[in-house]
Image (cartoon, rainbow, N blue to C red):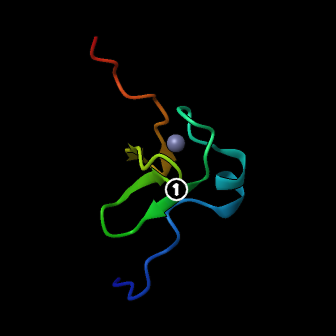
Amino acid sequence: MSETTKPDPIPKELFEMLSCPVCKGELRWDDGKRNVFCTKCDQRYPVKDGVPILLPPEKKD
Ligand SMILES: [Zn+2]
């Protein structure tokens, strides 16, 4: 069982429902880094079991 083409880890419909919790920007899947990033503020979010973990970054103040 070897797949030459990687399946889309996250369905497009799911992405259309999601937005960046920081700036409400559009999110994209980064196939190289295997995570999700915001096209506006470039914040990155981990993906677990195909589900983006959209937690805002910790504030350091
Ligand atoms: Zn953002």
Beta carbon at label 1 within 8 Å of ligand 1: yes
Q: Is residue 49 left or right of residue 24?
A: left
- The N terminus, quarter of image: bottom left
Q: Is residue 39 above or below residue 44?
A: below
Residue at 63% over, 43% down: 19
Residue at 39% over, 69% down: 31
Q: Position of residue 29 (x, y in %)?
A: 48, 61
Amino acid, disc 1: Thr
Residue at 35% over, 60% down: 34
- The answer to which of 61 and 30 lies nearer the viewer is 61
Image-quadrant location for residue 30: bottom left
Q: Where is residue 22 in the image (x, y as percent from the top left)?
A: 53, 32
Q: Where is residue 56 in the image (x, y as percent from the top left)?
A: 45, 28
Q: Where is residue 40 in the image (x, y as percent from the top left)?
A: 53, 50
For label 1, the SS is loop
Which residue does the numbered mark 1 point to in the structure image?
Answer: 39
- The answer to which of 39 and 48 lies nearer the viewer is 39
- The answer to which of 8 and 55 lies nearer the viewer is 55
Q: How many marks?
A: 1
Residue at 50% over, 74% down: 7
Q: Is residue 12 left or right of residue 4?
A: right
Q: Is residue 23 left or right of residue 50?
A: right
